[in-house]
Image: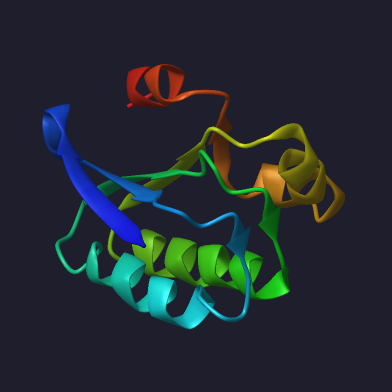
Amino acid sequence: MLIVEKLENNIDQVSFSNMEKFDSLVADDIRTELIKLFDVPNSKVIINLEGVRYIDSSGFGCFLSTMKVARNNYGTLKICNIIPEVLSLFTALQLHTVFDLYDDLDSCLNSF
C-alpha cells in the first residue's frame, strides 16, 4: 500500500498503490511509517497523492502529526499530485496554509 522511493538529493517520495481512500482504516498504519522517515534529522519527504480520491479527518490528522514530527526534527514535508476535489478539502480546512502543496512531482522536486 505505502511505497517509499529514494529520489535525487536524498528526497524520499511516498506514494500509495491501489489506495483511493485515505481514511481511518489506513491512517494509523501510514502515520507510523511516515513518522519513521523523519527519524533522521533534516529528512526531505514528498507525499505523492496520485490516485488518492478521498481523504477524511483521520487522513488529515495523519498529515498534521507527521508535519509536527518533521518540524521537530528539522525535516521538510511537501505534498503533490492532489486532485481538485481533495485540494478543495485542504483549502476548506485552511491546511493549504500549513502544507507546501504542489500540482505535480516535478514542481515539488524543484522547490527543494
For this rendering, which residue is in front, 91 or 51? 51
Left or right of 43 on screen, residue 102: right
Point out residue 86 in the picture as x, y percentages from the top left corner: 73, 45
Identify the image quadrant of the N terminus: bottom left
Point out residue 50 in the picture as x, y percentages from the top left corner: 51, 38
Q: Is residue 15 above or below residue 93?
A: above
Left or right of 27 on screen, residue 73: left
Which residue appears farthest toward the right when viewing the image? 92
Residue 34: quarter of image = bottom left
The number of numbered badges drawn on the structure is 0
Residue at the spot x=70%, y=51% of the render? 95
Residue 48: quarter of image = top left
Residue at the spot x=75%, y=33% of the render? 84
Left or right of 45 on screen, residue 50: right
Which residue appears farthest toward the front when viewing the image? 18
Identify the image quadrant of the C terminus: top left
Q: Is residue 104 above or below residue 5?
A: above
Point out residue 21 in the picture as x, y percentages from the top left corner: 62, 61
For this rendering, which residue is in front, 7 or 66? 7
Residue 85: quarter of image = top right
What colouring does the structure picture have?
rainbow
Residue at the spot x=21%, y=51% of the render? 42
Q: Is residue 83 above or below residue 45?
A: above
Left or right of 75 on screen, residue 57: right
For this rendering, which residue is in front, 21 or 46? 21
